Structures are given as structure tokens and as C-alpha cells.
Amino acid sequence: MAASCVRTVGSFLGKCGNSCSSINSVTSQLSRQVLRRQICVSSALHRKNQSNRTPPKFTAEFIEQQVEEFNIGKRHLANMMGEDPENFTQEDIDRSIAYLFPSGLFEKRALPVMKHPDEIFPKQKAVQWGEDGRPFHFLFYTGKQSYYSVMHELYNKIQNLEKYQDRLRAKGLFSQDVKQISLGSSRWLTKEEVEGVLVETITDHNYNRLIQLMERLLSMPYCALEEEFVMRYRQQLETQSRKQTVPPLQRDERGVAFSTAEGRRKTSNSTVVLRDCGSGKVSINGQESIRYFPVLQDREQLMFPLQFMDMLGRFDLECTVSGGGRSSQAGSLRLAISRALLSFLSEGEMENMRQVTVFRSVAAGLEGCSKLYAAVIGRFSVSQLMVLSAWRSCRWLTGQLFRPLALLKKLHLDKSFHIV
Amino acid sequence: YLYAHLRLSIFPLDTGCFHCSERIVQLPSWNGFVFVEAVVFIFLYGFQLVSSLFVSFQACHSEKHVGQFYTVPPAHVRIVFPYGLPRRYIEQVKTFNEACLMVRQPALEVISYLKKTDFSKPALRYVFYGVRGSGKSLSLCHTVHFCYTQGWLVLHIPDALRWVKDCTELLPSSYNTSRFDQPLQAVEWLRNFRTTNEQFLSKIKIKQRYVWTKREFTEEGSLLGELVDQGISRVKSSSDVVGALMKELRLQSGQPESNFRLAVAVNSVNALWGKSNIMKEDRSAVDPEELTLIHNLRKLMNNDWTGGAIITTVSQTGSVLIPKSAYLPQELLGKKGFDTMDPFVPVSVPNYSEKEFESCYLYYMDRHWLQHPQSLTEDGKKELIFLSNRNPTMLERICSSL
């Protein structure tokens, strides 16, 4: 085996004329050495790889100077706009810049921006060793000092909590039902976000260990004492149902219960009045649903919230809608109907509806309102999606269909949604 | 024998039709047989009607039959409606292998008026109107079938819009140079007329001499059948033949010596006074007045003749340059049309009532047309009601094949 390798290596090296490593050295260290292969290199490769370039380093003085300039510029801007320089907030700055530099570009990142230098220049590690060359932090030589310091801190806190619990047990004051940290509306920071906070790269393994340790901290009953520390590594979510205000149930002169709600989708706005009459009449902008929505798909969109709660023939719908195209009008009406329906439902049913109907809008929101997602994901069950994606020719489609699911998984949200 | 015959005649019959047996004039005899046998059958066995969906021939329809289906005998379908039924309905007929029409209030109303017409007075005009897909054409067909079974002479123009739109061949008229002929449409219509009114062709004689070309003429006193054959064989003069036919029938229908009643049934009558799609060689639009067929038909629409009735529908579907929201007779007929048609009896054709919807739904279930398991449940029915808004066409489209 070794002999044949030598022969190939030898011939190879002979062919390429590599004179750097002699054949003797190769034979002796064959198992260990990485065989150096001479490949044809083009001149392009000699140019430095652009993306591997390290980001430019900014010194602390430079950043300070930028901050000064920013403050002076802020006062100038306030002067220009005729406002009070002392109380000129960031919102005012944004407004003024948008006014002074109007732009028709859609990409937000291409518009002119004036923000505090801390938000513009990437966070950089301050100099970590003194004049004598000795590093300041005791964990400097681990290579990831912030990460390991966080881990140490966490473990310290866990040990302190355990000691605290032991003391309470000794006094007999230990109780299980202490106020817990409410985690329902937040999620763990992703690896990239943690890297941003710590200003250093960490591996997946590191990230998983951090999360594990955090979970261990949270499993202890008295973790509420360290809530502020934990919350530093959690991102608040905008949950729909927290902000969802149930429209009040009103009664008109005849005693018939009705509720009003609004909905929006893309550029359409709609209002729906849901009356508890017992007839299934639907009127949209004064016209019948068949006249206003000749396409079956739009009428199905109107039907879904009522069908889900089995209340099809019960309500009278009086809708007004404007703006957008036919699909977005139907979508906005659907949202308005679901909202108006909330006032006729109990809490459990409302939660049920949220988990199903919100999935569609969350998917749309996450992926930027792509019609394909919203239409496909919202209308098919997971089993049907699997069947669809089983076609070999639709492998791309499979990937696309499950992207929202994959993203949700990444955000640790997959458990909180019931996928229908 | 009883069983076999009943199976052929489809379903047990409603007992309410006793009194009507003497009114049946010109029906094929087997219908009467079935009726009598069914009565005997019911007497003998005295059982509850299995399917109250279906009723017998429509001559004896009354208020309590609203919502029930009746079958047009296949022979009648071929004769009365060679080209009369809406396209989707023809497909349904082919699929179910039978032509079942629902008995609905508007058609019943017009039929009751027709039964009571005084034939010495000028012809009354009835106009079916309603939203798109509410069943106007089929109500017209129901009425036409009734007239046929009562032995009237039926002048059925299944779609006046076909004469006003997309005409490929347009000849300058030989009779009047300012007008245009439509030979293909005229020939087609004459053929259908011949199929429907076979029995009258040999009975009616024309009272005037018509000269078609230098050598062709139709003598006074010859049969109507000859006139029609002349039109079919000589395509060039077919539009004028149509005009002559209409004139003859109009003049003869009220006379005491003629023994026929004339029923003029026009679908989408608003085409006569609307705009047309056809263009002349110099790309200017053709006014419907300039078309021979339309011109003669308009003369028929006037109520200056007696001994019959004019039944029409107005529809927006397929009409040229009319907004989709228009469905009332005044909007669709326009000023000229309304003035001509005035006074008329407007008959509104609404969407299905609850009972009618139920009946239609049960009919589809009975025919195993609704295959989805969800559609057979209560919830499925509610879905259908919501999505179709009880509109007959919409319901048919939702339930139809892909």
C-alpha cells in the first residue's frame, strides 16, 4: 500500500516538477503529511479574496470624533428645520432626512441615513491588552473571552441560586410556586445575534451549550431573581394575540347582537359588521357576494373563518372594502371577519383560531407576503403539503414550501403553533 | 308490466294531478297510460311517495309543485329544443341522460297567464328578468315546452344575441339595399323551426306571393313547408324567407279560420335594440336595425297581432357594451326597446328559495353528482349555500366537474 502510494506520489511529483519536497521526506511521513498538489492557478486567485478581507478597524479616537461630529450635525439639522436643537430626537432626525433627501428607492438600506455612530460602525473589541502586552481579561487566552465569561457568570448564578434554595430549605421557607419568568412572548437570540452581542464568533456547539445552561437556570424555581440577566439573551416577539383586542359586542335597537371589525391586507382596507341574525346574507359594498367576487377563490376566503368555527348560516355580513386587487380585498375581508367573530367566541376557541389563522399571516409576514406561501400554506394541511412535495420534479417546491416551517423551527416557535 | 313501465317513466307520481287528465290534448299516448297505471298502482298499494322530488308532465303544474323537478320526455327534447337550451344545461342533460327542469314560480306564473289568455285581444308580452344566472333562459324553455305540449306554434329564437354578434358572412340584402342579410344564421334557424313545428308546415297556407329571384317564386296558397324548404335550399334568400314567414304567421294568427296559436319566444330580446358587434367593410359598426333578421323580428315584437303571446327574456350575459351591473328590463332594453315593448308584464326570476335549493341539492345527491364526502353533510350544504348564494348557475358551477 505504502509502496504504491510512493510510486504515485513520485510520478505525480515528477510530472509536476515539484522540487519543494523530496521523495525521501514524503515516503517517511506519508501517513501524516498532507500531499501537496500543484494545481493550475489562474491569476484571478492571486488577487485577494474580497469577502475574506477583515472589516476595517476603527480606533476609539475615531469613533469619538464621529460621535462629536454627529452631535454637531444634529444641532445644525435642527437649526435647518427650525426646531429646538436641545430636544431633537432620533425620530425627528429621520423625519428631516427623509424630507431633505426624498428618494424613490424601495430598498430601505439604500436610503440616506443619519444615526449615532454606535449604530453605524460595527461593534469592535476594544484593545484587550495593556502597554506591557498583558491582557486585561483573565479568559483572554481562551480565544473567546466574552463567551466563556458569560458561561462562567451563568454557572456562578446557578450555584448561587442553589445555595439560596438550600438556605431557604433550611429555614423551612422553600416553596415551589414562586413567581416565574414569563417566557411566552420572547425567544432565545439566534447564534448570529449572540455573536453580535458578544462581538466574537462562536461555534454551533458553543451556542447550544449556552442555551442548555440557560435552560438549566430557568428550570430552577427561584430563577426569577436572575430575570434581568436572562432577558438580555431573549428577543421579545410581537405576538398577535397579545395585541389582539376583541371588538366589543354591541346590540342594536331590535336586540340583535352585532360586532364591527377592520382588517387590512397589502393595500386593501375593509370593515365588516357581523350580525347574529340567523340568515347567511352577505353584502359587499352594497352588492351581492356573487356580483362582487365572481371568482370562487375569493368567496372561499370569506367563508373560511365562519366555516372553521361552524357558524356558517348564523351570521349576516355587511362588508365594505376599498383598495388593492381582488385577492387582497378578499384577504382583508377574511381578517376582518375573523376579528369580528372573536367577540362571539370563548377564550379557548379564540386561541384555536389564532393558532390556525395566524400561522398563515405569520408565514406571509416572515416571507414578505409572497402569494405562493400565503395561498399554499394557508390552504393545505401539512399532510397534503408532504404529498405535494413528494413529487420529484418539485424538489425546489418542497424546499420553498417548508421554508416557513424551517424558519419557525429556527426561531424555536414550532412548538407554539398548531399546524393544521 | 306495471313495474317496468313505472321504472321507465322514472318515478312515482304526484296524486294531485287527477283533474288535469282531460286537459291533455296532443300528448303521446304512453304518458297518459303511465299516469293511469300509476294511479292504479298507488291505489292498490297505497304507499307513501318515495321521491316527492319528481312530478309528471308539466301541463298540470300548480303552486304546490314549486321546487319539484319534472322530466321533459327525450322525444320532446329533440324536437322542441334543437338549439334552445343553455350550453351547460345541455351538458348536464347528456351526463344525467335526462332533461329535468325545476318547476319555479316565475314560469308557473307565465304559464297560468297563458292558460287564461284571451286570444281575441292583442298579444301580451312577458319579460323574464333577473340577475345573472338566476334561471331566465330555463324558465323560458319551460314555458316553450308548455306551449308545445298545448299544441301551439312555437317561434323560438334561442338567442337573439347570436344574430347580432360575430357574424362572419354578411350579404347586402336583395330586397332592400340598405339592409344586410345573414344567410347562415337564417338557414340554421329555419332548420330548427322546421324540426319544432313539423305538424304545422303542412297545414298553414301562405296568403301572398313571394318572388325571390327572376325565376323563383312562391305562389299564393302554397304550404308553409314549401316556403321553409325554399329558404333552406336557397341560402342566399334565406333571411328574406325568415321575414316572409314571420309576416305570414303574424297576419294569420289572429284570424278565425286559422286553428293555431302563435307563441313567440325570444331569449335575450334586448339584443334587438342594443348595439351589435358586426362591422361593415369600412370598419363602421352595423346598427341592428340594418340587419334583415332583426328588422323583421322587431315587427313581430309589436303587439298589433292577436291570437298568441310573446314571451321574452332580457339578459346582460353576452350582450354588447352593457355594464355588468344592469339587470332590470329598463336598463337592458334601452329607451327605444322599452318604448316598443311597453306595456309588458315583467316577471322577476329570483335566486333559489330555501325549498328550491334543498330540492336542487337533493337532485344532485340523487344523481350521485356530489362526490365529495363533505358535500353530503350538513356543513357541506351550508358551504354550498354560502359560496353560491343560492344562485342556480353558481351552484351548478361549483358542483360541476373540473
Image (cartoon, coloured by chain):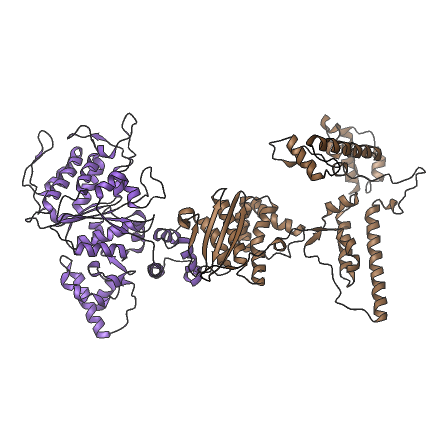
Chain colours: A brown, B purple
Residue occupying image coordinates x 63% and y 35%: A107
Count of numbered circles in the view: 0
Q: Residue at x 64, y 57 (%)?
A: A416
Residue with the most extreme right position:
A132
Q: Nearer the viewer, residue B252 or A414?
A: B252
Q: Is residue A379 visible?
A: no
User: Where A305 falls versus A321 (above or below)?
Assistant: below
Residue A104, x across and y down, in percent: 60, 32
Which residue appears at 65% of the width and 30% of the height? A101
Q: Which quadrant of the figure has residue B283?
A: top left
Q: Is residue B356 left or right of residue B380?
A: left
Q: Residue A79 vs residue A367: left or right?
A: right
B182 up-or-down from B223: above or below = above
Where A188 sits versus B293, above or below? below
Q: Quadrant of the N terminus of chain B?
A: bottom left
Q: Is residue B365 visible?
A: yes
In terms of image quadrants, where is residue A413? Answer: bottom right
Residue A392 horizontal/vertical position (percent): 55, 47
Left or right, A382 with respect to B113, comes to right
Horizontal and vertical percent position of residue A50? 73, 31
Q: Position of residue B332 (x, y in %)?
A: 30, 42
